[in-house]
Amino acid sequence: MTTGDAAPGLPADESGVRYDLDGPVATVTLSRPEVLNAQTPAMWAELSNISRKLPGDVRVVIVRGAGRSFSAGLDLSVARGEGDSSLVKLSQLSPDECADRIAGFQSAFTWLRNPSIVTIAAVQGHAIGAGFQLALNCDMRVLADDARFSMAEVTLGLVPDLGGTKRLTELVGPSRALEICLTGRRIPADEALALGLATAVVPVADLDGAVADLTAAVLAADRGAVAEIKALLAGAGQRSYDEQDRAEREAQTRRLRDLTETE
C-alpha cells in the first residue's frame, strides 16, 4: 500500500485528508478526528487534488472518516472566521465570483460520481451537512448502526450546495427530501436503510469487513461493464423509456465489440 501526497505545501495532517492506494482501490480518509472531521476549504482543495491524481487503474474509491464520526460537516470556526472562504467574505463577493468559488468547493465532491470509478462511503457516527453530502455523492453508502445523517444547512440559514440535493431527491423522492432539508433532523441508520439512503447497515465492528466485501464484489465484475452500468443507471432519471432502451442498446453494442476485440 502506498500513501499519496497531500496538496502542494500541505502535509496530510495539515490538509486534513489522507489518501492511500492499494492496487485498484484508493481510500480517502477525512483525518481530523479531534473535531469529528469537520470540513474546511483546505480539505476540499485536497479532495479535488486527489481526483486529479488518481491513477488510471483505480476502480474503487472508499471514503471514510477517522475516529468515531464520518464528518460533523462544515467547520464553523472557518465559516464564522475572517478567512477568504468565511461566510462573510463569500457574501462580499459579486454574485458571479461567489458562485465560482462555490463551484470550486463542489468539485471536491462531484468527482465521486465519475462513471469510471465506483465510490463507497463507509459511514460511522455523524454525517452532517457537508458530511452527508459527501456520502451522497458516493455511489453506495455502507453504514455502521450508529450512523446518523443530517442535512443541517438550514440551521445556519443556508442551503445544501455541495452536490447533494439531486441525489437525495432521487433516492427518497421530492417530498421526503424537502422534509429532510427543511428540518435538519438526524436520520438514524435503520431509517436511512428503509429510505434507500443506505446500501447496507452493519454493526460498527463489521463496517470495515462489509466495505471490503462490497469492494471485492465490484472488483470481481468486468470493469467495462461496471462503467457502462453506472452510466446507464445515472442517466436513467433524465431519459424516457425509449431513450433508456436506446442507451441500453448502445451500451451493449459497445460491450460486445470490446469483448470481441479482447479475445
Image (cartoon, helix red, strand yellow):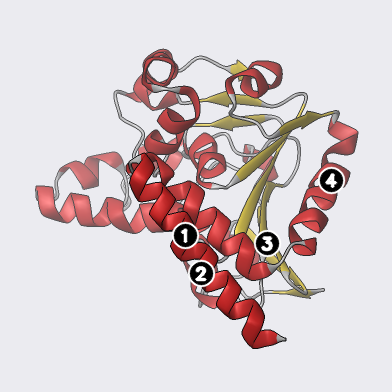
Say what secondary structure mark 4 lies in: helix
Sequence order check: which comes first, mark 4 or mark 3? Answer: 3
> Would residue 92 appear left or right of 205 to someone viewing this image?
left
Residue located beneath label 3 in the image:
60
Query: Residue 253: which numbered mark, if any?
Result: 2
Q: Is residue 2 above or below residue 251?
A: below
Q: Quadrant of residue 4?
A: bottom right
Q: Horizontal and vertical percent for residue 151?
A: 46, 26
- Observer-nearest of 140 and 220: 220
Task: Kindly check if marks 3 and 1 are in contact, taking CB atoms under 8 A apart as contact.
Answer: no
Could you say which quadrant of the image residue 142 lies in? top right
Say what amino acid the circle numbered 1 marks. Arg
Contact between marks 1 and 2 (CB within 8 A): the answer is yes
Above or below, 7 relative to 262 = above
- Residue designated by label 1: 249
Percent of width and height locating residue 42: 47, 58
From the image, state whether disc 4 or disc 2 is nearer to you: 2
Which of label 2 and label 3 is nearer to you? Answer: 2
Mark seen at residue 208: 4
Which type of secondary structure does the marked residue at label 2 adopt? helix
